Image (spheres, rainbow, N blue to C red):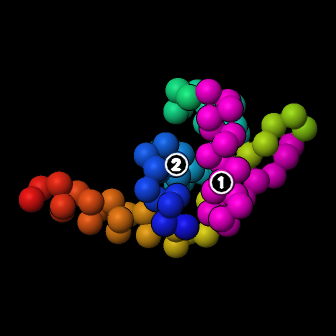
Amino acid sequence: MCKVFSNSTRLEILNLLRDKEMSVTRLIKKAGLSQANISQHLSIMKSKGIVESNREGKNVYYRIANRKICKAFDIIRDVLAERLKR
């Protein structure tokens, strides 16, 4: 799970999913990354239980699996910000 938090693209995806469920198409537009890149990162996060998905027709929607993940994300971000200030 810590490897998920060590990748800037995955952190960006988690931040986008923080408050709402999003389709892969919307994540691609928001993050400005390729479909292959987004899908690869989502697959890793899904295998680790960080995100969940559901399919509606042709669209796949992702959401954060557990709200505590956001708390962990915030703590790690704060620690990194403190280290950068030093």
Q: Which residues are the magenta region?
A: 34-56
In the image, taking residue 45 as reference, residue 9 lies left or right, namely left
Q: Nearer the viewer, mark 1 or mark 2?
A: 1
Distance Cα–Cα, label 1 vs label 2? 9 Å
Disc 2 is placed on an element classified as helix
Picture quadrant of residue 39: top right
Q: Position of residue 61 (x, y in %)?
A: 74, 46
Residue drawn at (46%, 50%) of the image? 7
Dots 1, 2 in contact, CB < 8 A: yes
Picture quadrant of residue 64: bottom right
Amino acid type at circle 1 is Ile
40 lies above or below 80:
above
- For marks 1 and 2, the one nearer the N-term is 2
Residue drawn at (35%, 65%) of the image? 76
Disc 1 is placed on an element classified as helix
Amino acid type at circle 2 is Arg
Residue drawn at (27%, 60%) of the image? 80
Q: For residue 51: magenta? A: yes
In this view, the residue in front, 30 or 42, is: 42
In the image, taking residue 40 as reference, residue 78 lies left or right, namely left
Q: Which residue is mark 2?
A: 10
Q: Which residue is mark 1?
A: 44
